[in-house]
Amino acid sequence: MRGRHRWAMALSATGSAPRHVRALLCAALFMVIAPLHAQSLAPVHGGQLPSLETTAPPRSIALVDGQPLAIADGEAWHLDDARQTWRRLPWPTGTSFLPGAIVEGGMQAWALTTATGAHEVTGVAQLRVRADALQLQPLPPLPEPLHDARGAWSNDILSIAGIGADGGARLLQLRTNAERPQWIAVGGWPGGGAPTSLVAQSAAVFITVPDASAAAERLLRWNADTGWTERGRVPGHVLPGSGHALGQANAIYLVGDDAAAKLMTFQVITSAWAVLPGAAPAGVIATGAWTDGMFWAQRHADAQRIDFGYARVESTKLLLRWLDWVVILVYLVAMVGIGLFFYLREKRTSTAGFFVGGRSIPFWAAGISLYATNTSSISFIAIPAKAFETNWQYLTNNLIAIVGLMFVAIWVVPLLRRLDLMSVFSYLETRFHPAIRMLASALCIVMQIGSRMSVILFLPALAIATITGIDVVWSVLIMGVFTILYTTLGGMKAVIWTDFVQVFVMFGGALFAIGFIIHSIHGGVPAFVHTAMAEHKMHLLDFSFDLTKATVWGFVFLVLFDVVLTFPKDQVLMQRVLSTRSGKEAGRSVWTLAAIMVPGGFVFYLIGTALFVYYKSHPERMNPTLPIDATFPLFIAAELPMGVTGLIIAGIFAAAMSTLSSIINSVSTLASVDFYEKLAKKPTPKKSVLFAEVAGVVVGLVAIGLAVLLSRYDIHSLFDVSIELAGLLGGGFAGAYTLGMFTRRANSPGVAIGIGSSICLTLLAWWFKLVHPYFYLAISILLCIVIGYLASLFFPAPGRSLKGLTIYADRAGRDE
């Protein structure tokens, strides 16, 4: 492994030290370098399927409806449900297939059809096996016949690549779920050449073609953004038709020849090849996708039957060691201890004490808590995964957000702090109507539980499951229960001071991980920077005007709407601001958040880039079956030394639990202040606190249930999902604050119309995929502002005094 000679030199330099010192140093160094070996982390489990008695070798094989199917000239066989016996299927009349003529897509399959006796593909039909018979449902015919055709399917898009009658390359695509599907020609690949394989993966198509000038084949990628790009050379020759998608970001191939071939994976993000050990089939005549792997048909020596084998990539579990568990246990006990401390210290009869910490929190502690709340497990896991997959474009949001936070600190936060609120939605009642307050509060509760808590719980659970082998459900339960416990025990003070501790735990683990990764790269910092720059992994600013991409202009809109205009409605953030001693300190807490945001964001994006460089050099250290969001957890488990692994897992806990505790506390505050105290006949402070505690437990349990539900789905990027849900659910009522604080004319009927209309119209934009999900929030807020203001013109202007409720009112009472 790279860098071991440096360790050896360091060790030899201690030759003059006492023997026991050298022994301790050897043990310590072994703990560090022990994980850094070149062993593959993708073990392969192989096996055999029943042989097929036939003299006609299959031209194509595939999994259709979950069972293997083999097709020869005028014959077809289907393996029974028990996978014991091949059964002959009636052949569809007037139908002919060519070699490699089945396109697989999960539980679906399509056949490339041709006229009897012809050698060109003219059509495509969905393939099913029903009542022991092949059934074909034709799609629209191809615009032109293609020979040497290959197919692939992903995300409801069927791609067919082949050579036209004029010898030119063709790539055709069809959306299979369209009401009237039509083929679209997207252009042939440069350099031509008959395709040997076609794989659809990660919103792109990967094709291998022979290269007459080299011993290996070319591999090219096509996607809608960049068109065709070269992705390097195949380390050998791909067996025709042997390319299949694997996991979320890999393709699996058989590379070699008829005599001997080896299973290899191609990582579509790093463009790195890795050999899968333990499978080297010979005499392969056809291949098909298998669950997490591939299966193949082989010639038998007696030429009277066909043998079938398969290989499946296993997901290994890298168990924590004793020191890791000690570190994690100390962290969890410390968090509960802080909650218990404030439970015993406070009398629990004051709503202000439980909900806003008695308004006695220093601004610097509130600011750090603001950052901890913003920095969830999404930051610790999903953002490194996003940077690993793409670049630093999303970091633009942090840079532009500072400008938005300045405005918030000067104008918005002091105004609301002076009102001595506990629920930020109390402002909407004072400014508009109690119904607006309760509607907005209810939508906020749904958004926090649905789009944030469940994702924040699930991501660290994924990390723990990847590392320890503990089932995701148990991981979710452990995290959720501990967070519920210390949050409901200690109230707001416990939440803020645990946040304070958690920020240091989180950054300590993250910074160590970055240093460790870069040290493990051959060439150190210079090699890291060179590779990252060459692959454009540090690309930050995109000034294009494409509304389907995350551009600078999109982030400007996002900051305007997600920071400036939504900060007032964010109970989770505002509750910290409302806990400070004065309006001036409230503003300073936001300045503290702004000061930490950029360096903090830089740390998490740098982790993803470092992971890219590391795994580009060591693709064998990845497991191709794991989701992209598991990239950093995999590194933590497989590469870091004992004890440090536990520290970084504690950092993952810290990132998740700080946000979870904040949301639980805030949602329980809303439930108590906005609903219980409004609807109960004789509410008392003691009963309000008790209701909030019960509500916190219920909210936590609901979030646990939703996180378990998320674990049942294969989601490509939870970072994108969280943004999408927040935009769909959170924008409507955010516009109400803008109308209330920045206009005098807005009234309650108009605002109610604006909220309802914005939610409905944003759902339409989501349904038809009109823009990038980053714009949903901005669209929803803008619609609420425009429609709400125009609708307000049809109703009488507010008759009561707006003093202290808008930025135009008398501000002489500002706290110093």
Image: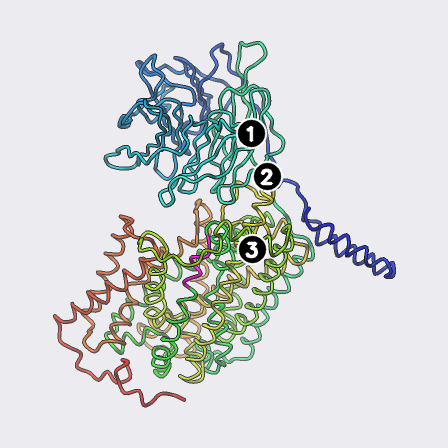
Is label 3 in a helix, a strand or a loop?
helix
**Is 384 in front, or is 167?**
167
Q: Position of residue 358 (x, y in %)?
A: 46, 82
Q: Which mark is residue 218?
A: none
Q: Is residue 512 in sight in this rendering?
A: yes
Q: Which mark is residue 42?
A: 2
**Crowding near the residue tagged with mark 3, few <14, some 14–19, many ≥20 C-alpha atoms within 10 Å:** some
Q: Amino acid at mark 3?
A: Val
Q: Is residue 176 in sight in this rendering?
A: no
Would residue 246 appear left or right of 137 to someone viewing this image? right
The magenta region covers 391-397
Image position of 637 with respect to 125: above or below:
below
**Which tag, 2 or 1, sits closer to the chain's start?**
2
Is label 1 in a helix, a strand or a loop?
loop
Q: Which mark is residue 236?
A: 1
Q: Is residue 114 magenta?
A: no
* Residue at position x 43%, y 15% in the image: 72
Is label 2 in a helix, a strand or a loop?
loop
Q: Which residue is mark 3?
A: 529
Q: Position of residue 514 (x, y in %)?
A: 59, 58
* Residue at position x 14%, y 71% in the image: 793
Image position of 505 with respect to 27: above or below:
below
Q: Amino acid at mark 2?
A: Ala
**Which tag, 1 or 3, sits closer to the chain's start?**
1
Q: Amino acid at mark 1?
A: Gly
Q: CA distance from mark 2 to mark 3?
A: 28 Å
Would residue 346 appear left or right of 571 to someone viewing this image? right
* Residue at position x 47%, y 68% in the image: 597
